Amino acid sequence: MMLLSGCSGGSGGSDGSSSDAPPSPLSGVINIEANSRVDQDTMDRLGLEGARPAPGVQRLPESFVLGGYVSGEDGLYPADKRSCQELFYAADPVDTYTIPLAPGDTLMLQNFGSCLAGASLELQLDSGQAGTALVGGSVVLSGVAETRDYTVTVSNPSGAPARYILAKTASATSGNLSFTWPEYDFAENHAIVTLESEGGQSRAFAAGAGMTSRHLGGDSWLLTRPVMAAASPPGGGRKHETLSWIRDLRGQPGLAQVQPDYLFRTEATPIDEPFYPRQWHYGLINGPAAWQLVPDGGVGVRVAVLDTGLLRLGSGLWHPDLHDNVKAGADFVDGGLPVDPGNSIGGDVFHGTHVAGTIGAVVEGNGIGGVAFGSGIVPVRVLGEGGTGKASDLIEAINWVVEGAKADVVNMSLGGLPELTQLENALQRGVDRGVLFVAAAGNASSSVKSYPAASPRVLAVSAVDGAGNLAGYSNFGNWIDLAAPGGDASRDGNLDGASDVVWSASGELTSGGAQPGYRGLQGTSMASPHVAGVLALMKRVRPDLNHAYVLNALEDGALTGGVGERNNTLGYGVIDAAKAVAAAQDSFAQTILSASPAQISLSSEGLDTQRVELNVFGSGEISDIAISALPDWLAVTDKNLTTRPYSFTVALRNDLLEQGAVARGQVGVTYQVGGKASTLTVPAIGQLISDQEARDAGRHFVLLVNTEPDERGFYLAASQVVVEAEAGEYAFHFEFDDGEEPHRLSEVRPGDYYLVAGSDHDGDGLICQPGEACAEYPVAGLREIVTITDESSLSNIRMTTGFSRPTISTTTPETLPRPGFKGYRLLDVDVGGARNSNGAKAIQ
């Protein structure tokens, strides 16, 4: 808790007033994130200023993140439906912008809908390029042919209101930004902890009376809190209690990090069709040619399938297409044998069996064959009822595989986790021992990173249909490494007369028990095992195959149908099994330099210097490292290129940049490996920011809200002021409660509050929803309690608002999820001088 109180003032008389009372209990300034812009006719303006349309086409700068609102109709939000209040919303079917675009630039539109769910939004360029963003989804347009100003429209001609984000950034990193609050689910009364040292272990566990612990491997442990009999608090129940307990644990000695035990899920969608042998997906990855190069199908290579387990028959045999290849596995959900119960998604899906079949089903003339049909399958059950699992089980399973040398390749057709230190540590131990990790990118049609796939230690696989086009459900983004067949039941991309689903081993639940069968499914869960199978074939011909080699080969275009160029949908392209195996048979140099960060992005307002670390992958000796190329607007201020760890620092030269323009270039690093010359190229972007005066995130409501949600999960405002952007910032000022009626919205009564601010673009009476700007004191995602007293007088408060949201990652381990967070509810506001008797906003 943060106590904010003043030391001045006195009683001054019986009424407790004072002639020298401070003018405001709380005041300050809200800065606006760089490049923030707002649609000219959101409900902030349509509703509060009388339904005025935008004055004209809105021009946007080189880089921006814009929050907007469109609606194909006007009306009232119905009370109590999806958290709606009975408030007016106005029609605004089209927003039009002028945007400078160049080849390589990317535009992203993300549709957040409203409490009415909203409608699909259309993004269109005057060049004819267009795309549709469904509610909760996004669309990305890129590849313009020439550098010029483009007319861009966002339209919603007939649907319900919708909030949206339109983004273009200089470094094309809009896919890295998250515009929604972290909502990762987690196990109640569990915490994953990392110890500061072995000596901290006893102190850490002794600190929590009644807690139990389980070693997950390495320096990671799972703590379990005893279930309390006390009633659960409103708006969060046991989840709320668990998060409070985790916050308390973070203050205990001996614990370097404490995080929730996040849950993950399968990444497949069941398609209920009878089996028919249409395995188009093997032809798409050039499987038949690869099998000629590796005729034994990967004998001696073991692939761990971290999933729901495998179908086991009453006779004690595994699925007949897998039995001969199954090796000893483990069940981290229930213990015992890793038996697939068949109910991971609903019905008799047998998700893990399907995945394992794509990797290693034997070729025997019947049923289904796998990509690496001769490889050993190590079933590892980490997914339980409903196809969900806990991060602690996944971490323990990875450590089990790595420390016991159980497998050469690990497939994880699961996802939905944030970035966790303990998970990254387990993956790194595997990479250090030569284990290759593959994971499904996810099925949310989103660029939001999903772990474990998004880890740099894992190959992230997106899904394509029969024509090699990105499947409609597949995730995308600059974290995607490559693509593989995942299927799409809504398409016949290869024109074979059947839906593009992936066929593999499955099962059926009957009164006599589980029976073997086959099924067509779609999902990135189906794409990932294609890549895992190809890696097993590569490992067969190159036993020392490692993660660094695979990444280098990907970038060279040696593993896919691409030419070494990547995009945010298919990564480096669709896996080509024959090409990949041929590359593994060559004497490819395995020792390389890699830069961290992989791209230098500097600005006069953000980072203007960057330390670049050069990491060595492989066992070869690297020498003669030198910086061979440098844009004139960068300067090297410090370097160590002779001893490990290698690194150098670059700084922005503002005097050589044009204000407001974006400069692009490359930093070249040459080096020798065993007498062979190699070059590492690091992309660089620099910008001299000039948008301070133009920054605007929309009208902001600054609130002091109650620190606990009500029974419906809403955080209710107690005091409220409304501010507009001036010179790129918002100034706010609350008033003391004078004790007289009427009580003004800006008056503050003593108490404990959260200080928050944000926009209400769709006019639903809530701020800080996805797609709207938001600020929290002191930092978004890490709000602290502010205590106001009768004599409080705190000024010069500084906050920052913007459309992005904090993410849960190894760089922000203190951030916690917000299950069920609905936003902060505004106080009723007079609108246009009128107030409806039912509180609905009315336009005059």
Image (cartoon, rainbow, N blue to C red):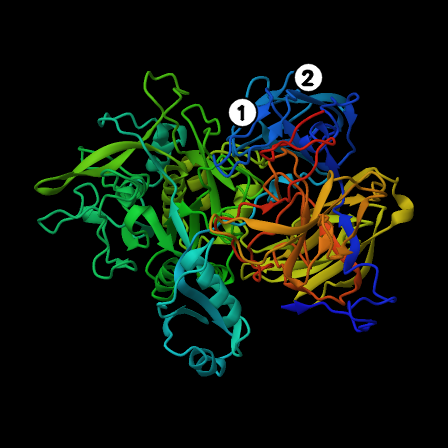
125 and 477: which is toward the camera: 125
Q: Is 453 rendered above or below residue 618?
A: above
- Residue 630 visible: no
Residue at image location 65% in from the left, 38% down from the top:
760
Circle 1 SS class: loop
- Residue count near mark 2 (Cα–Cα under 10 Å), binned few <14, some 14–19, many ≥20: few
Left or right: residue 4 versus residue 85 is right
Q: CA distance from mark 2 to mark 1?
A: 21 Å
Residue 662, x across and y down, in percent:
80, 38
Image: 370 above or below 625: above
Crowd class of label 1 (few under 14; some 14 to 19; many from 20; radius 10 Å): many
What residue would you read off at disc 2?
Answer: 127
Who is closer to the viewer here, 799 or 681? 799
- Kindly indicate the quadrant of the structure image that contains residue 322: top left
Q: Determine which residue is flagged by label 1.
A: 120
Q: Could you tell me residue 409's position as x and y percent?
A: 38, 52
Label annotation for residue 458: none
Q: Residue furthest right?
A: 655
Task: Provide residue 212's location: percent of width, then percent of height.
Answer: 36, 74
Q: Residue at coordinates 90% horizontally, 45% vertically from top-left?
A: 656
Residue type at numbered disc 2? Ser
Going by the numbered disc 1, the residue's amino acid type is Ser
